[in-house]
Image: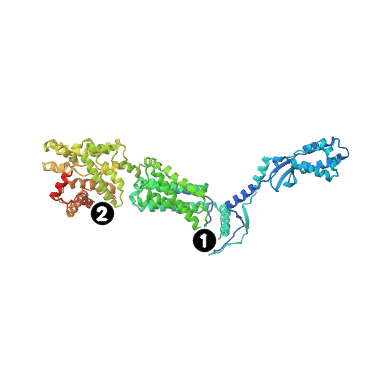
Amino acid sequence: MLIVAALLAAAAPRAAKLCYDYKKGGVWNYETLYAPFDFPIMKTSEEIMEEMDRASGVRVPYYKYSDEVTRGALLKAATLDLGEYSPAVLEALGVVLERGVISDDSVPEGSGIIYVQKEKRALKVPAGEVSGLSAARASFVSELRKAGVPEAADSLILASSVSQLIVPNLTFDEQITEAVNEESRRMVSPTEGFVSAGQLIVSKGEIITADIARILDSYKREYESSVGSSGPVYLNILGNVMVALLLVVLLLLSILFSGKSFFVDTRYYYLVFVFALFAGMIMLLVRFYPMLLYMAPLTLCALYLQAFVRARVIVPVYIISLLPLLIYADHGASLFVIFLAGGLVSIYCSRYLVQGWKQFLLALINFVAMALVYIALRLTGGEGGIFLNDLLRLLVAALLAVFLYPLIYLFEKIFNLVSNSRLVELADTSNPVLRELELKAPGTFQHSLQVMNMADAAARAIDANPLLLRVGALYHDIGKLSNPMCFIENESLLNKPDDQKYHSGLSPEQSAEDIIKHVSDGVDAANAHRLPSVVVDFIRTHHGTTVTGYFWSKYLSGGGNPEARGKFSYPGPAPTTKEQIILMLCDSIEAASRTLTNYTPEAYSAFVEKMVQGKMDQGQFDNADISIKELALVKEAIKNYLAQMHHGRVVYPHSKRNILTSNK
C-alpha cells in the first residue's frame, strides 16, 4: 500500500490549484474576494476564435509595384513623334502609371483597402485609386484633356499607339497576402481588460454573472500558472503525499468492510492494482493532458471490479478511484458525477450485457447515461450551449471501455482469478466435460443439477457468490467419470440384481478406496480441461476430511479396527470459504434426502439439522469463514428448497385419469 501511495504521489499534478468552486449563475459562498495581484481579463476560447474568423474574413490583397514597367513605358513614349503634344502625353501617361494598373482579372472587389509595395514599403491604398487595364486607358484620355491636349489630336495619338504602352504594373502576391492575413489572426488579443491589485472581484453572497465568472476564470488561470507555482515546491509535494495516503486509507477501509479474509485473497492485490491504475491515470491526465479527461475510459474501472470483486466492495472502491477528479481536475465535480453515473449504470447493466455484441449495447447505454448527466449539468450551470466535442469524447470513452474489457482475461492469468464472464461460460451445460458427464454418468449429472439449484438458493441467503457456486456444483463430481458404475446413482440405472452390482464382491476397504478416488480423479480431470483453480478447490473440498459413512459403518460392524479410520476418510482439505461450505452441505444433503420417506416441514428441518451437525462434529467448519448466523440462514434456505423439490401433487380421479390416458 505504501508503494501505491508513493506512485500516486509521484503521478499527482505539480501545479497549485485554486480552491474555489463556483459556476456562472451560482452564488459566491466564500468571503469577499479582492484581487491580490494584477492580472489580465482573458477572453474565452470561443470569443478568440470568433475574432480570428472575422479577421480571416477581411482578406486584404497585397500587390507589388513594378518601377521597371513604368520606366519602360515612359522611355518608349519619349521616342514617339508626337510633336508639340509629347510633353503632355508623357505627363498623362506618368500620372496613370503612377496610380497603378492591374490586369482586368485581378481587380479587387469592393471599395476596401489594398497593400501596395513601393520601394520596400507597403502602403495602404484605397482600392478605388488603382485601375484595371481598360479603366486605366480610359483614364489616360481624361488626363490628356487635363494636360490641354485637344480632341483633334486624338487621331495622332491613337496612330502612335501610346495607349498600348499602358500595361499592368501591379502584380498580386498570393504568398504575402496569406502571410499578412495569418498575422492578422495572430494579432487578435486574448485579453479584453485588466484587473488591478486591490480591485473588488466578487462579494460574498453575490450572484456570479457572466462577467464575474470571466474575471474569476482569469484570476484562477493566472494564479495556477504563475503565482501558485512560485511557492515552495515541498508544500505541493507534501500535499500530494497526504492526498495519496488519504486515498489508500479510504481504500483499506472499504476493503475491511468486506471482511478481513479479503486481505489474504488474490482479489485484494487485483483490487489494489485496479485502483492504482485508474487513480493514477486520472492524475497523469490532469497533469499532462487535461483535455483528454472526457475521453478517459474510467467506467472501465467499474467493469474490471465487477468481474472479480464482491458486489458490496465495487461501488466504494470505484468512488475512491474517481476522487482525484474532485481534488485535481478543473470542473472536477462535473466530471466526477458524469463518470460516477456511467459507472453505476455499467455495473447494473453488465450483468445482462457483457457477452458478444451486447457489449456495444452496454457502451451505448453507458454513453447515454453520461451524456444526459453532462447536459443536465450544463443546463443547471446556466450554459445553454452543449459542446459537441465533449459529447464525442464521452462516446469515445464508452467505446474504449468495451474494447479494453477483454483485458480481464489477461488479469485472470496474472492474478489467478476467474471472472464472471468465464463463470457464465463454464455454467453452460453444453460444455464438453458436462456433456460427457450427462452421457456416461446421468445419475451423477442429475445429482449435480439439483445440488447446483440448492446451492444457488443457499448462496443468495447470505453474502456468497451464487454464480461461482453454480459452477462448483456442476463440476464437483466430474471425477466419477473415471468409474461411473462405482456410484449408486448410476449403478441403479442398470437394474442388475444386488449380487451383480459394483460393490457386491468388494471389501469395505476396497469400496471406500474406489469411492474416495473420485476426488483425485476429479482434480486430474479439471486440470486436463484447464478449469480455474477456484473450481478445482470445490472438487478437493466438497467432502472435506469426512469418512465414507456407509462403508465405515459396514467395516466396523464386521469387526474392523477403529484405528483404521484413515482408510475411509477423504484426503481433504476441509472447506475454507462460505461457498465451499455451502457446496459440501448441499452435496451431502441432496444425496441423503433421496432416502427420506416423510415429506413434512418438521422432517426436513430435523434432517437438515442432523446433517449440518454431523459435518460440524467432524470439524469441517473449523477453517471456514462463515458465522453461526450465516449458517442458520443457509440451513433455512436448504429446508425451503427441499420442501419445493419434494412438493406434493393432486391425485386425479380415476375416471379423469382414464380420459387423459386415452387422449395420449
Lateral position of residue 107 relative to residue 450, left or right:
right
Q: How is the image coloured?
A: rainbow
Residue flagged by tag 1: what amino acid is it? Gly
Where residue 101 sits: x, y (%)?
75, 41
Q: CA distance from mark 1 to mark 2?
A: 52 Å
Mark 1 or 2, nearer chain start: 1
Residue flagged by tag 2: what amino acid is it? Leu
Residue 633: which numbered mark, if any?
Answer: 2
Residue at 53 percent of width and 58 percent of height: 24
Lateral position of residue 655 relative to residue 433, left or right:
left
Residue 35: which numbered mark, if any?
Answer: none
The correct choice, above or below, for 106 with respect to 221 in the image is above
Which residue is most to the right? Answer: 84
Q: Nearer the viewer, residue 245 or 56?
A: 56
Q: Of helix, strand and loop, which one carries label 2?
A: helix
Q: Nearer the viewer, residue 15 or 63?
A: 63
Where residue 449 sits: x, y (%)?
24, 44
Residue 623 visible at all: no
Q: Nearer the viewer, residue 310 or 193?
A: 193
Residue 26: which numbered mark, if any?
Answer: 1
Pointer 2 local density, CA inside 10 Å: few below 14, some 14–19, many at least 20: some
Q: Are marks 1 and 2 in contact (CB under 8 Å)?
A: no
Q: Of helix, strand and loop, which one carries label 1?
A: loop
Lateral position of residue 454 relative to residue 316, left or right:
left
Q: Nearer the viewer, residue 490 or 533?
A: 490
Where residue 220 sits: x, y (%)?
56, 55
* Quarter residue 587 falls in: top left
Residue 266 visible at all: yes
User: Looking at the image, is mark 1 or mark 2 nearer the viewer?
Assistant: 1
